[in-house]
Image (tube, grey):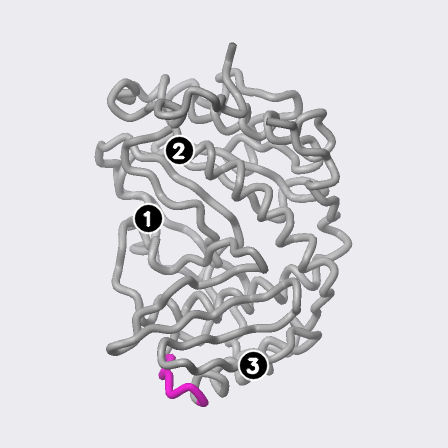
Amino acid sequence: MTAPTATNWPSLRVSDWTETRDTLHMWTQIVGKIRMAHAPLVNHWWQVTLYVSPRGLTTSTIPYRSGAFEIEFDFVGHRLEVRSSDGGVRGFPLRPMAVAEFYAQVLHTLDELGIEAPIHPHPNEVEPAIPFAEDHDHASYDGEAATLFWRQLLQANRVMGEFRSHFVGKVSPVHFFWGAMDLACTRFSGRQAPPHPGGAPNCGDWVMVEGYSRELSSCGFWPGGGEEGAFYAYAYPEPEGFADHPVGPEGAHFSSEFKQFLLPYEAVRSAPDPDRALAEFLHTTYEAAAVLGKWDRAALEDDPMRWDGTSTPRWSPK
């Protein structure tokens, strides 16, 4: 396999699109809450997430009465598209607009398709939590930045998906949590965890209790923590010695502020082989959790290439 060139990993300074990022964060919360209103609870809130698609972010199929619908952010054509199983298609252009206007347009679009969308109309995990219908503060949309962010997610999703394939135990999809605006993938040891203390702003502690009810090792990417965003990895509960465990590649470090390992996106983007650099971070930070937490690795891990003698993983410690 030929190593991807750095040009596949776009540069996007957080400081250049902060206003668009914060507006888009609220937009994704609205769409994510619509999915949450209709999808049954699945482990640790997996039913509420969005997914990276070939054009942006999608809810995937949302069950509705005897049919289904889907909402997608198209960051190539810059539209919000809603498609229903009865053949209905509606949408509107993504452009600079206040969260209040976006919220009203989403509800109107769903109403045209005969879809009811009862949601809690306030954002979560942010402070202040301005009700969507009253939010005229967040109103930016830089289409070029939105496309570059999606392309960051596209690369992260691809490498994290390969990393996910090495685990045969309980593991989440690679999915986008709109609460904190991060792409995440989480592995579980199979053991229960102590109740999480909660503490996320404008989010009930019971939400975190469910999210962290099993011992886990989680990794992901979010547009913060570095000049161009950052990859992260943490364990819950955090085993003794976790912060001091050696991890790679160069540039990875444990943040006492965030209580997790961080690897700046720009360190991956500028690496000779970005895929390998990110894979090393994902594997070594997981090993920190699994080794120190005494996970049953023999039962939980496997070689995804076991049926293909011609393929090799993107990263290995040898």
Q: Main secondary structure of the magenta part?
A: loop
Q: Amino acid at mark 3?
A: Glu
Q: Residue furthest right?
A: 16
User: Could you say where residue 270 lies in the image, as x and y percent from the top left?
Assistant: 74, 31
Disc 1 or 2, which lies upstream in sequence?
2
Would you name the residue on which mark 1 appears? 211
Q: Specify whether residue 100 is painted magenta.
A: no
181 versus 30 height, above or below: above
Disc 1 or 3, which lies upstream in sequence?
3
Is the residue marked by circle 1 packed among few (<14), some (14-19), or many (20+) residues within 10 Å?
some
User: Could you say where residue 316 lies in the image, as x and y percent from the top left?
Assistant: 50, 17
Task: Classify mark 3: helix, strand or loop.
Answer: helix
Q: Residue at x 41, y 35 (%)?
A: 164
Calculate the distance from the C-alpha at mark 1 to the C-alpha at mark 3. 29 Å
Is the residue marked by circle 2 packed among few (<14), some (14-19), or many (20+) residues within 10 Å?
some
Q: Amino acid at mark 2?
A: Ser
Q: Find the magenta span and give its range.
A: 112-117
